[in-house]
Image: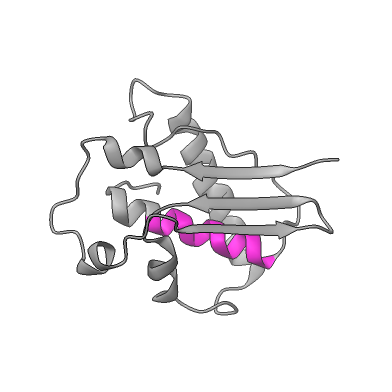
Amino acid sequence: MRYLIILLLVGSVMSCSIQKQGTKQAFEDSKVDNDTIRIANDSLEYEIIIVEPGFNAWLASQRPRGYYGLNYLDQRNEFYIIIYNMRVNDPMGFDPNLYPFRINYEMGVDYGYEVNYLLYHYFLFFEEKYNQRLR
């Protein structure tokens, strides 16, 4: 049984010293200790788990499901994942607290809309919150 576990656990990142000056008030107002999203695609045996304070509230302020096409989300995620995984492999160049785990995402596999939608928005959230550019 194949599982795609995309575990982006950056709760430990809170302890690192990276702070974005002028962080939007939405982040401060929306911090929740147990802000976890789990999406399981049982028919394909893939799952995404996002554990990140403030992500749920941030996601609610973004473009709704259906705004982006699946092809767009898939292409953007492939690009983001390549860069993210390169940074995971370079702990001397990038903070290992921000990039703790590789994302096992196989190009060409149809993970479904929900997984791609949440992964894409997590990358946008990650860039904004931690002042990282994955482009």
Image color mode? one colour
Q: Give the residue at x 26% y 69%.
A: 26
Residue drawn at x 39%, y 43% is 11
Q: Is residue 106 visible?
A: no
**Helix, strand or loop for the magenta stretch, by majority:** helix
Q: Magenta span covers which residues?
A: 113-125
Find residue 125 and report its horizontal and vertical position in percent: 39, 58
Q: Is residue 98 left or right of residue 75?
A: left
Q: Which percent across, then down, holds residue 41?
A: 75, 59
**Nearest the eye: 13 or 89:** 13
x, y percent for residue 43: 84, 59
Q: Is residue 84 magenta?
A: no
- Residue found at the far top of this picture: 92
Image position of 100 (left or right of 114)? left
* Image height of 33 relative to 62, above or below: above
Figure quadrant of residue 87 = top left
The picture quadrant where one finds residue 114 is bottom right
Taking the magenta stretch, the answer to whether it contains residue 119 is yes
